[in-house]
Image (cartoon, rainbow, N blue to C red):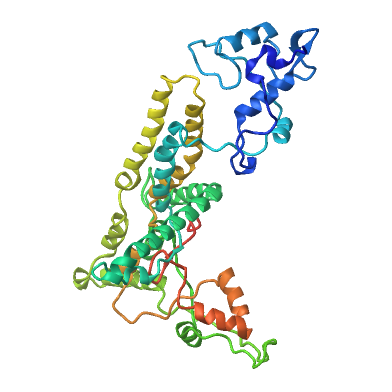
């Protein structure tokens, strides 16, 4: 009877090269315990009736065949071993990267029955990060259709469709959060670097206005207000152009670019769109407010007492932001608590692979709390609503501000030149899947670019 490796190591009997999970390895069907068995099986051969290492072996060279057989007989087999109190551990099997890519591609899906593999990372790290990413300012978000809030569960039809509408709104909200979370992960580096740069600029401005040593510089009130507003409102984008009247009417009416009678190219020449400077822009209102306050001080006629002073408005703009502790500080304590619990729990399960993965998973997801911390610690306001309320003077508002045309809108305008596409787009113009995160004459800029 021919001897095989399985004769000396029962764990390798009937070993197949294919993973036990029928799913493709690229969809989570890989099993790295099976990969360990395959690597160990390729490392062993039978020579003259005795097991020995092959020419290319993945087992630690310091481990002899006798030590490997002893480990297999005493619950210390390299593949799937559990910590039994021996700090020496099981023999180590190390494969090369090329071998792993060639023989064991893909990834292994967490097992639903083993709660420690997925419940801990989900509750301790993923769910808190979904809440943390909402503190990072943005300019766009997915819009929930008004039809979701149109029905009430007081009628039979409303009760029948209420839960469907509610489920649709929850799915849109979840999709919006996941998309924004992915964007934060993708651009975490530029965001953090821009925030640090903004901190440096804010510090230079504040040290210039109030030096740690020496007297404050003697500069005009207008320049001092501009510098302070740059610190407090540095993350707010203010448009310098506004739409022309014809373009505003075209956007409101849902009309499209004139098309020819056939299906060919556009015959009429598209007129160039001209824009003028915003006459009643946010920044101009701010400067007007500064000038009025400075004139009132110079006149000393008592009129300054009848209006809210400029320092009070600046301080109100700064104090309107939520405190760091209430916004993100308390949440960070719960997030750190997940790490503390995992570290303490690891003392009772030394050598557990799931605990090591949970800690590594949490360190990877710490990128999102870093962004949330650096966002909420800024002096600059992340939302334009407070600024709009302070500078609003009760007069007629200007035409809608014109920002740079987006990539998607530019292609939509080109598609409107053809009648079939123009008809389809005209029907879809009633619903815009993306809306502004804040309503008003100004909007938050991309995170960190306000500096």
In the rendered image, residue 168, in percent from the top left (x then y), is placed at: 40, 62
Which residue shows up at 37% across the image and 73% down it? 285
Q: Is residue 329 left or right of residue 273?
A: left
Q: Is residue 206 left or right of residue 100?
A: left
Farthest residue in the front direction? 1
Which residue shows up at 49% across the image and 81% down it? 243
Q: Is residue 198 above or below residue 279?
A: above
Rendered-image quadrant of the N terminus: top right
Query: Looking at this view, is 73 or 308 the one in front?
Result: 73
Can residue 293 be spotted in the picture? Answer: no
In the rendered image, residue 267, in percent from the top left (x then y), is placed at: 68, 91
Query: Looking at this view, is 11 or 118 the one in front?
Result: 11
Q: Is residue 188 above or below residue 230?
A: above
Can residue 379 be spotted in the picture? Answer: yes
Q: Is residue 190 left or right of residue 269?
A: left
Which residue shows up at 45% across the image and 78% down it? 430
In the rendered image, residue 242, in percent from the top left (x then y), is placed at: 48, 78
């Amino acid at each position: 009877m021919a001897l095989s490796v399985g004769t000396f190591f029962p764990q390798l009997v009937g070993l197949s090269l294919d993973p036990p999970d029928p799913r493709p390895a690229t969809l989570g069907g890989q099993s790295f315990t099976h990969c360990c068995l395959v690597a160990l099986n390729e490392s062993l051969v039978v020579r003259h009736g005795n097991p020995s290492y092959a020419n290319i072996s993945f087992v630690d060279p310091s481990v002899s065949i006798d030590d490997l057989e002893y480990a297999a007989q005493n619950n210390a087999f390299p593949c799937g071993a559990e910590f039994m109190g021996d700090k020496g551990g099981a023999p180590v099997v190390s494969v090369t990267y090329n071998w792993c890519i060639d023989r064991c591609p893909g990834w292994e899906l967490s097992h639903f029955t083993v709660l420690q593999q997925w419940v801990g990372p989900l509750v301790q790290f993923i769910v808190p990060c979904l809440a943390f990413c909402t503190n990072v300012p943005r300019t766009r978000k997915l819009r929930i259709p008004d039809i979701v809030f149109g029905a009430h569960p007081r009628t039979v039809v409303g009760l029948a469709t209420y839960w469907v509408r509610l489920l649709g709104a929850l799915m849109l909200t979840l999709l919006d959060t996941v998309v924004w979370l992915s964007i934060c992960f993708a651009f975490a580096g530029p965001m953090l670097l821009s925030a640090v740069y903004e901190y440096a600029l804010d510090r230079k401005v504040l040290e210039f206005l109030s030096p740690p040593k020496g007297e404050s510089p003697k500069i005009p009130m207008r320049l001092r207000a501009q510098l302070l507003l740059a610190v407090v409102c540095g993350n707010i984008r203010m448009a310098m152009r506004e739409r022309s009247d014809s373009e505003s009417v075209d956007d409101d009416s849902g009309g499209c670019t004139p098309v020819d009678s056939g299906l060919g190219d556009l015959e009429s020449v598209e007129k160039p769109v001209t824009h003028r400077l915003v006459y009643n822009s946010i920044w101009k209102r701010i400067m007007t407010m500064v000038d009025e306050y400075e004139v009132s001080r110079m006149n000393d006629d008592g009129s300054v007492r009848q209006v809210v002073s400029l320092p009070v408005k600046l301080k109100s703009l700064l104090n309107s932001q939520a405190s760091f502790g209430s916004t993100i500080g308390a949440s960070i304590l719960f997030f750190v608590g997940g790490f503390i619990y995992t570290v303490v729990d690891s003392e009772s399960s030394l050598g557990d692979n799931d605990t090591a993965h949970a800690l590594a998973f949490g360190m990877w997801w710490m990128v999102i709390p870093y962004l949330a911390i650096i966002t909420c610690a800024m002096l600059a306001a992340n939302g334009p609503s407070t600024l709009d309320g302070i500078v609003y003077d009760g007069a007629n508002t200007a035409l809608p501000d014109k920002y740079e045309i987006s990539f998607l809108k530019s292609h939509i305008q080109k598609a409107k030149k053809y009648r079939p596409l123009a008809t389809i787009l005209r029907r879809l113009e009633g619903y815009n899947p993306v809306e502004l995160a804040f309503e008003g004459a100004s909007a938050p800029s991309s995170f960190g670019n306000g500096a």
